[in-house]
Image (cartoon, rainbow, N blue to C red):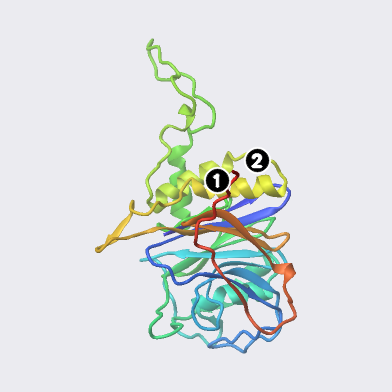
Amino acid sequence: MCTASNYITDNHYFGRNFDYEISYNERVTITPRNYEFKFRKIDDIKSHYAIIGIAAGIDEYPLYYDACNEKGLAIAGLNFAGNAVYREFDENMVNITPFELIPYLLGKASSVAEARELLDEINLVDINFADELPLSPLHWMISDENEAIVVEPLKDGLKVYDNPVGVLTNNPPFDKQLFYLNNYLGLSNKNPENSFGGDIELDEYSRGMGAIGLPGDLSSASRFAKVAFTRANSYSDSDEAGSVSQFFHILGSVEQQNGCTFISDPDLYEYTIYTSCYNTNKAILYYRTYNNSQITAVDLNNENLESTELINYLLINEEQFNYIN
């Protein structure tokens, strides 16, 4: 399970918590403009926008979990088990496999508006990357500095929703997640007034009582409400340091600690393997991992973007301590 969010100050920030029980040797992968994207059912693309993101460390293909391109468009794919439906080949559509969707959209679209136009023609076909790597059931959040959308492959077709809250988790489908926020319309970042009724005198015995009722468990519906509230009420300096720091705090509000979400014996638990944060205006990726709290940065523009070869950096997973004496 995962959580994605955007955040806007002087720049547009986008990223996600990647929550899972197993790591696939995740790495930062930069796809230069002239790396040849090979697709299963459409023509290969030899020239495209440069892309930076976090991908599985598998084969020589960028299996992106989340990424942004040099134009400021960002995408994250999140687990959507039980709801994602992929289709058979349709000769009247652009047939893209789910693992090709991020490279295809980020390679061709410079904005959410352009991504919408491409999505109108896309059919997500049910083709595995490899026999040992079956497709993950996914939905996607797509964001730029102007708007965000959610893309969901459902039984009745590919749905594209406007995303006014700028967050996404997992199940249920996005329209239901939005509706459930009605349950929390009375919450506030201010302490409440006594409206209990009668002549009962009630005291504000603690700060933060305006958010009593905000869920704190790790289910996807609860994480959606929690991070939507946190993002909506976030305040930070608008410079890079303040914005990036606050973004990690937003997603930190729903971070999963190892041991709290049991998966199976022996000792297998879901936890936040990494958290990513993209300044999409500058094409800089910041990340930290479960075992490395230090924020690491990779700048797309510091690479040779005219290359034909992928550029990879393994995630730094060892804790970095800053000794001051």
Q: Please determine whether, in this image, residue 54 is positioned above or below residue 168.
A: below
Give the labeled residue for mark 1: 249
Q: In the depicted view, which residue is nearer to us: 279 or 163?
A: 279
Q: Please determine whether, in this image, residue 20 is positioned above or below residue 190.
A: below
* Residue 190: x %, y % from top left: 54, 27
- Residue at the left extreme? 265
- Residue at the top extreme? 199
Label of residue 236 in the image: 2
The amino acid beneath tag 2 is Ser
- Quarter of the C terminus within the rendering: top right
Q: Which residue is drawn at the image coordinates 62% and 84% (left, top)?
A: 37
* Residue 158: x %, y % from top left: 50, 70
Mark yes or no: residue 102 visible. yes
- Quarter of the N terminus within the rendering: bottom left
Q: Which residue is drawn at the image coordinates 40% and 20% (left, top)?
A: 196
Q: In the depicted view, which residue is nearer to us: 325 or 252?
A: 325
Mark yes or no: residue 154 visible. no
Label of residue 128 in the image: none
The amino acid beneath tag 1 is His
Q: Which residue is drawn at the image coordinates 73% and 60% (left, top)?
A: 282
